[in-house]
């Protein structure tokens, strides 16, 4: 009997060991999976393209219980935040983007009972699709249970995101100022260099200056960081003997449009302008900063949901995405929409890949066919490469 009891005891201990080992291994595996950094963004397709999906103004709140705004009477009874989620998923399936950018007012803080829960639901389609994504803040993200800084700190550890609170070691205004590099094709002469530079800035929420009302603006400290970063990227790119003589192009993403956008009339834009430009009353000079940097080809914003146009000013395309979210003001009968941007590499005569040749854009509507509209070229390289093919 004693021998039998001893045998059972050993079996129980062995079973416990196996359970503990399996549990520990699962925990370690899970932790490791979340801590492993994502690979760098890269022109990984054999066709030499990199596609970015911009999602502006989701205004996500509490899911199915959150009703839509400015939709047709026939839509209202069944329309909720889930329509926004479904639109993101449809766009991912249709466009198969390499990267997603969420340009602020990702959640509508006033109506979101718990910011963390709303943020998780808002970004869930990108995470489920295992796509790299990044976000900046708008003027409503901080109005729930998390401060502006806390919202950005909550976003950064989420799965598949490349978002950052701010550059390491830099004292800078706002939360969510950072850059990402898109590397050249694997196996090409530029595989170790960024051939497309992406900049993200926190355009703030509301002015804290007692003498200036209205919306916030991109501050001097942010612009100083931007200029320094742009200069470093351009120097690094040009140091490669296989690089083009001109700089790698840059794209900039933030939420609130610049004051200069007000000058565009209907004859100088592609898209529609259906509401006044809700920009800062103070002009901090960021357009001039981008012009002087010499690498920026386009800047993309959200904020004004009924505007979806691009207009060119001083060599830079200033583009709205158009309102995406259903729990946000819009225009009944005017479809929610999203902007897509594609950078295409130049091919050399030997069949290899060089730097970016062109940048194009279009929008898709959340209608039955995900209609594609307003295709346009934002930028095309005109200068010759500095090396022979």
Image (tube, rainbow, N blue to C red):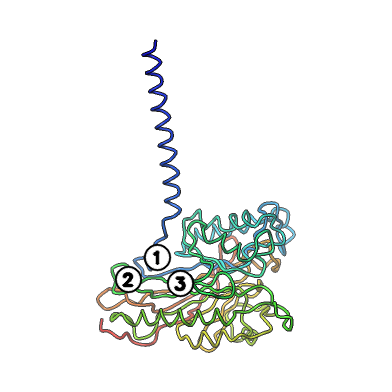
Residue 175 quadrant: bottom right
> Which residue extends farthest top?
1
Q: What element carries label 1?
A: loop
Residue marked by disc 2 = 191
Q: Which of 345 and 272 is in front in this view?
A: 345
Q: Where is residue 212 in the image (x, y as percent from the top left)?
A: 72, 82
Which residue sits at x=39%, y=77%?
A: 356
What is the distance, in whole Å, between disc 1 and disc 3 at their CAs? Answer: 18 Å
Residue marked by disc 3 = 342
Q: Do the residues labelled 3 and 2 touch (CB within 8 Å)?
A: no
Q: In this view, does 234 lie to the left or right of 128?
A: left
Q: Which of 277 and 83 is in front in this view?
A: 277
The circle drawn on residue 358 is: none
- The mark total stands at 3
Which residue sits at x=73%, y=54%?
A: 77
Q: Residues within 10 Å of mark 3 (few under 14, many from 20)?
A: some
Which residue sits at x=50%, y=87%?
A: 291
Nearer mark to the viewer, of 1 and 3: 1
Q: In this view, does 109 lie to the left or right of 344?
A: right
Which residue sits at x=43%, y=40%?
A: 24
Q: Quadrant of the N terminus?
A: top left
The circle drawn on residue 40 is: 1
């Amino acid at each position: 009997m004693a021998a039998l009891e001893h045998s059972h005891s050993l079996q129980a201990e062995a079973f416990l060991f196996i359970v503990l080992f399996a549990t520990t291994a699962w925990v370690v595996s899970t932790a490791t999976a979340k801590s492993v950094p994502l690979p760098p963004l890269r022109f990984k397709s054999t066709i030499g393209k990199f596609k970015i999906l911009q999602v502006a103004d989701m205004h996500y709140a509490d899911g199915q219980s959150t009703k839509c705004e400015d939709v047709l009477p026939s839509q209202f009874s069944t329309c909720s935040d889930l329509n926004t989620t479904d639109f993101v998923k449809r766009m991912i399936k249709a466009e198969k983007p390499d990267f997603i950018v969420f340009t602020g007012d990702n959640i509508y803080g006033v109506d979101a009972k718990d910011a963390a829960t709303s943020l998780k639901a808002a970004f869930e389609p990108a995470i489920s699709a295992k796509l790299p994504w990044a976000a900046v803040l708008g003027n409503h993200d901080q109005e729930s249970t998390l401060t502006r800084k806390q919202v950005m700190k909550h976003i950064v550890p989420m799965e598949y995101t490349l978002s950052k609170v701010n550059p390491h070691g830099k004292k800078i205004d706002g939360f969510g100022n950072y850059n990402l590099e898109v590397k050249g094709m694997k196996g090409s002469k530029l595989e170790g260099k960024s051939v497309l530079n992406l900049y993200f800035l926190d355009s703030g929420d509301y002015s804290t200056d007692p003498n200036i009302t209205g919306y916030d603006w991109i501050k001097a400290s942010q612009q100083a960081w931007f200029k320094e970063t742009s200069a470093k990227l351009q120097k690094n790119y040009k140091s490669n003997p296989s690089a083009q003589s001109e700089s790698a192009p840059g794209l900039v993403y933030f939420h609130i449009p610049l004051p200069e956008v007000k000058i565009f009339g209907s004859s100088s834009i592609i898209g529609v302008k259906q509401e006044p430009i809700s920009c800062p009353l103070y002009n901090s000079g960021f357009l001039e900063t981008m012009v002087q940097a010499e690498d920026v080809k386009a800047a993309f914003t959200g904020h004004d949901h009924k505007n979806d146009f691009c207009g060119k000013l001083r060599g830079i395309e200033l583009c709205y995405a158009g309102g995406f979210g259903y729990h946000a003001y819009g225009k009944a009968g005017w479809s929610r929409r999203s902007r897509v941007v594609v950078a295409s590499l130049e091919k050399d005569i030997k069949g290899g890949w060089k730097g970016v040749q062109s940048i194009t854009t279009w929008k898709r509507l959340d209608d039955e066919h995900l209609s594609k509209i307003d295709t346009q070229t934002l930028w095309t390289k005109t200068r010759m490469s500095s090396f022979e093919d």
